[in-house]
Image: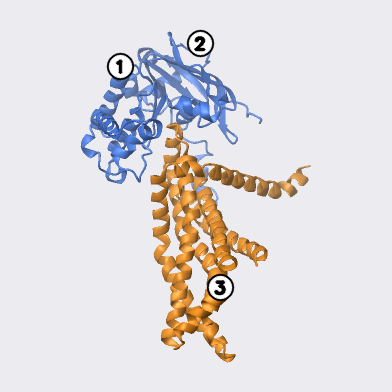
Chain colours: A orange, B blue
Amino acid sequence: MKRFYALIQPFLEFCGALGRRLHFLVTSLVLVPSALARPRQFIEQLFYVGSVSFILIAVGGLFVGLVLALQFYTALSRFGATSSLGGLVTLALLRELGPVLTALLFAGRAGTSLASELGLMRATRQIDAMEVMAVDPMRRVVAPRFLAGILAMPLLAAIFSAMGVLGAYLIGIKMMGLDPGVFWSSMRHEVRFHSDFVNGMIKSLIFGVACSLISLYEGYHARPTAEGVGQATTRSVVISSMAILALDFLLTSFMY
Amino acid sequence: MTIPVPPRPLTGTRDLAQPTGPSAIRVQDVHFGYGSRLVFSGLNLTVPEGQITAILGPSGSGKSTLIELMTGQKKALRGQIEVGDEEVGVLSRRALFRLRRRMGVLFQDGALFTDLSVFENVAFPVREHTRLAEALIHHLVLMKLEAVGLRGAHSLYPSQLSGGMARRVALARSIVLDPLIMFYDEPLVGLDPIAMGMILRLIVHLNRSLGITSLIVSHDVSEMLEVADWCYLIAEGCVQGAGPPASIREMKSPWVRQFVSGGAEGPVPFHYPSRNYADDLFGKVRSA
């Protein structure tokens, strides 16, 4: 019996961890309306989550656009199809690179910030203080941050893609001398609003749920020590990154 | 869950004195532990209403845990804790929150919200639980800060406060909604004599003027014997001595006498159990 228990223990632990995360997700989702009822806190968090990632996302998007345009231009010029550069870069950004790279950068910047903030609140007993003051920390602390994370992600992904297109414009038109009309018309011709833009935003929204949930969960349940907060922060990046890549595969296989 | 065998009490608990008059909190046969380590094994005590009760005991005796059990942050493995007419362990989260609105807790390290100013920290419970006008909140918060002598520090942030100041802000926050029961977790740790005297005077003043039931957890024996109306000495998982301060000073129990006098020799060991000192020093060197 002991051997059997030892065999299934990892599975039971996995189920327990999954159950706790699902419970956290459901509780956070249920409390979203209460976060909307306190717009000041929610807007503060949206500003904070967005502002800490903005520069990273904007610069990241610009450089990804620059590199993509260079690579695509080289490949397309072999077939004399450089006129498709604008459409191709925009498609890559809207469908995949925008949502995925934004989410990865968000997990590394805003996600770690959320996890360490909550972990520190746990370690310094601020969450306990709320509990004994009869204030629900899930409602007061987690829900506004969760909602802010969900809404910030599509906005940041849109900024990432826009900066990427700007990067492609600089390479294609300013550096390689492509005709601007050809560049923009290729983009308008290739990109579909629903299948490309909306699906990309849906992906971002789902990545926002996953990233915010994982970061907040890890921070909220951090061991109340310096080491515990550090570990929670690291775990939030690792788990978020893996979740984003796995979810991207699933979503792509359903959407396209 | 199996409960480990409790250690034998150093003195019996049945013959201990009990406070007379109405009680605010009743702890009956409480068992609690962390993993295999048992903290309480049949703890019984009563906190008299409207008085200052001191819970004294050495470090690690479970004094702070007792507050966590009374406020419902932790649940006892066995036994009952009644606050007023309500049994804490069986309350729903909503009912527990309703009960906690009648309580105030001063944490050992203050537990101030680091992203809020002193003013906003004190205003926090008011904003969360009432719909008072901003002008009224302003007056209320400044009155409480004046009571702890920190009205002038209302715009500072916790990182700009000393340990004693942070403790006083936390005290102002915990009394801002005029609780019926106040829990003080080691309120004197790390304070200079002036701040210590100030905090003690505040505790007594709050108790005498508002009739608040006060429970202080501490190991500062002499200070507690000065201000408390009733004292409990806990160790080894249960109550080792109980009574008003005068009777605690007179107790014959070797444990109580050693604890009150701060003696190194007696039934309370200073050293953690270990093997022979000479063997450790000159025996085979073992890797850590």
Residue drawn at point x = 57 percent, y = 24 percent? B90
Residue A198: give x, y in percent of width and height.
Answer: 56, 63
Figure quadrant of the N terminus of chain B = top right
- Label 1 marks which chain's residue? B
Q: Is residue A4 left or right of residue B123?
A: right
- Label placed on residue A117: none
Q: Nearer the viewer, residue B191 or A208?
A: A208
Name the residue: 40% across, 18% down. B231
2 and 1 marks on the same chain: yes
Q: Residues within 10 Å of mark 1 (few under 14, many from 20)?
A: some
Sort mark 2 into few (<14), some (14-19) or many (20+) by Cα contacts within 10 Å.
few
Between residue B163 and residue A38, name the one nearer to us. A38
Q: Amino acid at mark 3?
A: Val
Residue under circle 3?
A: A191
Q: Amino acid at mark 1?
A: Arg
Image coordinates of residue A108 in percent, x first then y, are 48, 61
Query: Could you tell me which secondary element the residue under label 3 belongs to?
Result: loop
Residues A50 and A137: in front is A50
- Separation of marks 3 and 1 at Cα, in angstroms: 75 Å
Toward the top, the furthest residue is: B21
The answer to which image quadrant residue B262 occupies is top left
Please say if B268 is above or below A207.
above
- Residue denoted by label 1: B208
Residue A80 rendering spot, x and y as whole percentages: 57, 91
Eye-nearest disc, 2 or 1: 1
Chain of the residue under the numbered disc 3 shown in the image: A
Q: Quadrant of residue A88?
A: bottom right
Q: Which residue is label 2 attached to?
A: B15
